[in-house]
């Protein structure tokens, strides 16, 4: 029993000694890294070799205990944003790791500044020991702490990383220039060859890429193309790559206009491979950076194209031309705006609602870049409640201010006389009372003029009728003459278009509660776009003048938009859109403008007033006024849809009519612009096929030329349709 007792005591002593020994062990992390600079080559620098070396070192040192191995495979030493390193430092901060062992200093990092900061500041503060085996560095030794060779080694490691980065990038650039490109990704419609150097047509997806280009060249807009692909259930390139399927459920389709744009502008589909747009920089952790176009490497005819090169280049020229036009116009516009100052900033208040009035600058003619005018408008103009549309021209405001200054100067010249006059004379002859009376009188006159000139008013006969019948039964009527008025055949200044928008918006607002259904249809189904489409197809079927062969492209353009024709008519039939009293000829030249102030006075040509859609009147105005050229311009390069003029018209129109229009009517306005333009083009083309029996022409192709201008506008509206909708939603 005594012997057994001694044996137990001995065991207890050994256990106690082992426990005390374990307390003195440092929980040690083995950190290994395979640098991206090595290109993944299996050398003595591989993770396996590093791990074996480090773990053996820990095993051979009795004061160290392996607590875990942390690794980063393919990460540059110039960047400390590595997952393995981040995990290591998290465990260091929680106290799980008291020592770090690496093969050499370069494995820990190649940025000498940040590496030095870790070794000299961070790790010592956390009381963590650091060992670099092959560099014979141990932070627990005082001589190593003071050794200058460590910072020098870190600097050498940084220089090595920088030099290696340059060599790798140079090698990759040389491969690209020689056409030796390893494809990591391929464009939608292609698959990789077995050697990963070429793109091969994917017969499953390629037809849809070709379809996108065909649709766009036929005039289908990018948003419309996206809609068609979504309706077909076609997966986007991203969905195709992720899921491997060509089709997806309709509710999961994600095609958008920008997705289509990426395909249309990708030179891959012309047979080219473009590399070098983004370069990888290994040094200092910079992953990628953009290069200038001069540094791009373009390899032509590397694979089978989806579109002919001539067609692709034509598309790019058109896109670049539009970008340049827009950019040049914007630069000139902003530069010209800066010339004119707001002299009355914060000083002008509305006489009706008391709100601050702000300056609105129309500082250029979009053609001549000449100054047009400046006016001040009430800040409540866009409020749904307490709406106020007061405004005053800057020149008139300056005159009123100068008048008041002159009155003030005059009064200050003789204060005593003025005080005596104020005490004794409160009649209308007093300067201040007289000025106030004049202002009130002018306001009454303006109000009366606005009411009188909203539309042309008739001179009644002695019997009180609006017209007179002569002996032959012919009706005659007389209208009040509007003095100092003028008509414009084309938008010369944005202010004119804005004033026309105010006029037609006011027209709709004034008749907003009138029962449109009670009106007689002067021209039945005048703006029934579905009927207009069927009339066009009938003219095409008959082709009485054998002209269809001359306008195949235009015919295809119309036929491709059959579904569009019914968008508004369907909403009318379903009761979504209400009937309104509409003018049905809302061109700029059907408004009389004040030739002195430029303001819209009244609307003329009322013969076609009948029930219709607000979107139709709005759209006809845009068709006529937002075009950069005449209706029969032969040079289509001059014909463009001006989105800024569209914005101006929307602003003016909704300032007047927004509180009358329903939300559905607001949303229909961009469609009105597209469909009225398309409808007008269809009518011109149908008349051309019929032998010019409706519209007056001056040469045989006149109607065809007119149709082409309208279709050019439709195409550009479709391309900018998303922006058109956003503009309406803004106001």
Image: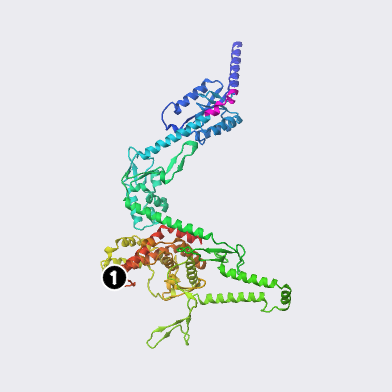
Query: Is residue 40 visible in this depiction of the protein?
Result: yes
Indicate the quadrant containing the N terminus: top left, top right, bottom left or bottom right: top right
- Vertical placement of 542 versus 214: above or below? below
Depth check: give the residue in front, 237 or 122.
Answer: 122
Q: Among all residues in the image, which is located at the extreme bottom?
A: 471
Q: Main secondary structure of the magenta part?
A: helix
- Residue 364 image offset from top left, x and y in percent: 49, 63
Identify the coloring.
rainbow
Label 1 neighbourhood size at 10 Å, few (<14), some (14-19), many (20+)? some
- Vertical placement of 194 versus 369: above or below? above
Please check the rendered image and state whether residue 147 is part of the magenta-colored stretch, yes or no: yes
- Residue 219 image offset from top left, x and y in percent: 36, 58
User: Which secondary structure, mark 1?
Assistant: loop
Looking at the rendering, the stretch of residues picked out in magenta corresponds to 142-153
- Residue 621 image offset from top left, x and y in percent: 43, 67
Q: Please indicate whether residue 439 sits to the left or right of residue 598 in the image.
A: right
- Vertical placement of 460 versus 237: above or below? below
Please check the rendered image and state whether residue 526 is part of the magenta-colored stretch, yes or no: no
Query: In terms of image quadrants, where is residue 423?
Result: bottom right
Q: How many marks?
A: 1
Depth check: give the residue in front, 644 or 536.
Answer: 644
Query: Is residue 69 visible in this depiction of the protein?
Result: no
Q: Which residue is mark 1?
A: 691
Depth check: give the residue in front, 719 or 409.
Answer: 409
Q: Please indicate whether residue 621 sits to the left or right of residue 148 in the image.
A: left
Q: Among all residues in the image, which is located at the extreme front?
A: 413
- Vertical placement of 680 versus 50: above or below? below
Q: Residue at x 38, y 37 (%)?
A: 174
- Residue 583 image offset from top left, x and y in percent: 44, 72
């Amino acid at each position: 029993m005594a012997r057994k007792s001694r044996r137990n005591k001995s065991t207890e002593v050994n256990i106690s000694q082992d426990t005390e020994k374990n307390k003195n062990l440092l929980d040690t992390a083995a950190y290994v890294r395979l640098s991206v600079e090595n290109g993944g080559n299996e050398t003595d620098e591989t993770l396996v070799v590093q791990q074996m070396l480090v773990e053996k070192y820990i095993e051979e040192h009795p004061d160290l205990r392996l607590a875990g191995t942390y690794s980063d495979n393919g990460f540059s030493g110039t960047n400390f944003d590595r997952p393995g390193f981040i995990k290591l430092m998290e465990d260091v901060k929680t106290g799980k790791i008291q020592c770090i062992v690496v093969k050499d200093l370069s494995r820990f990092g190649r940025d000498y500044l940040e590496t030095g900061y870790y070794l000299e500041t961070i790790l010592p503060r956390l009381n963590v020991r650091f060992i670099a085996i092959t560099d014979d560095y141990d932070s627990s030794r005082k001589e190593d702490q003071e050794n200058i060779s460590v910072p020098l080694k870190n600097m050498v490691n940084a220089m090595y990383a920088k030099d290696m980065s340059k060599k790798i990038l140079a090698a990759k650039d040389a491969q690209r220039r020689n056409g030796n490109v390893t494809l990591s990704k391929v464009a939608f419609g292609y698959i990789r060859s077995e050697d990963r150097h070429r793109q091969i047509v994917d017969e499953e997806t390629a037809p849809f890429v070709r379809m996108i280009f065909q649709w766009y060249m036929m005039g289908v807009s990018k948003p419309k193309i996206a809609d068609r692909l979504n309706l077909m259930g076609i997966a986007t390139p991203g969905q195709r790559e992720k899921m491997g399927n060509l089709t997806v459920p309709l509710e999961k389709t994600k095609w958008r206009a920008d997705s289509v744009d990426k395909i249309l502008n990708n030179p891959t589909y012309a047979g080219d491979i473009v590399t070098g747009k983004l370069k990888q920089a290994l040094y200092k952790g910079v992953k990628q950076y953009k290069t200038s176009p001069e540094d791009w490497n373009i390899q032509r005819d590397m694979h089978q194209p989806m579109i002919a090169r001539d067609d692709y280049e034509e598309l790019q020229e058109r896109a670049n031309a539009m970008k340049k036009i827009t950019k040049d116009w914007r630069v000139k516009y902003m530069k010209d705006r800066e010339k004119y100052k707001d002299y009355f900033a914060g000083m002008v208040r509305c006489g009706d609602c008391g709100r601050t009035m702000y300056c609105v600058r129309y500082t250029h003619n979009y053609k001549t870049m000449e100054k047009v005018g400046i006016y001040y408008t009430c800040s409540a103009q866009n409020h749904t409640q307490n709406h106020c549309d007061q405004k005053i021209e800057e020149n008139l405001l300056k005159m009123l201010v100068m008048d008041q200054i002159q009155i003030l100067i005059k009064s200050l010249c003789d204060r005593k006389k003025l005080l005596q006059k104020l005490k004794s004379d409160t009649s209308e002859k007093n300067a201040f009372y007289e000025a106030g009376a004049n202002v009130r009188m002018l306001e009454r006159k303006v109000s009366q003029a606005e009411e009188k000139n909203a539309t042309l008013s008739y001179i009644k006969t002695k019997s009180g009728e609006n017209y007179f019948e002569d002996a032959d039964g012919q009706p005659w009527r007389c209208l009040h003459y509007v003095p100092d008025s003028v008509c414009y055949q084309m938008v010369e200044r944005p202010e004119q278009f804005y004033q026309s928008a105010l006029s037609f918006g006011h027209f709709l607002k004034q008749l907003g509660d009138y029962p449109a259904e009670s009106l007689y249809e002067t021209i039945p189904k005048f703006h029934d776009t579905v009927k207009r489409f069927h009339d066009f197809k009938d003219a095409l079927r008959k082709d009485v003048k054998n002209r269809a062969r001359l306008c195949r492209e235009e015919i295809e353009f119309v036929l491709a938009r059959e579904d569009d024709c019914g968008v508004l008519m369907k909403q009318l039939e379903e009761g979504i859109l209400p009937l309104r009293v509409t003018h049905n000829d809302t061109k700029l030249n059907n408004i009389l403008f004040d030739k002195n102030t430029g303001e819209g006075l009244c609307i003329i040509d009322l013969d076609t007033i009948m029930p219709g859609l607000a979107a139709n009147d709005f759209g006809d105005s845009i068709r006529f006024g937002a075009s950069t050229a005449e209706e029969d311009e032969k040079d289509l390069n001059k014909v463009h849809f001006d989105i800024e003029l569209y914005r101006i018209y929307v602003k003016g129109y909704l300032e007047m009519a927004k509180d009358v229009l329903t939300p559905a009517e607001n949303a229909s306005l961009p469609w009105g612009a597209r469909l009225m333009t398309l409808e007008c083009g269809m009518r011109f083309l149908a008349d051309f096929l019929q032998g010019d029996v409706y519209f007056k022409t001056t040469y045989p192709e006149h109607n065809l030329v007119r149709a082409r201008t309208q279709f050019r506008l439709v195409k550009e509206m479709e391309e900018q349709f998303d922006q058109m909708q956003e503009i309406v939603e803004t106001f």
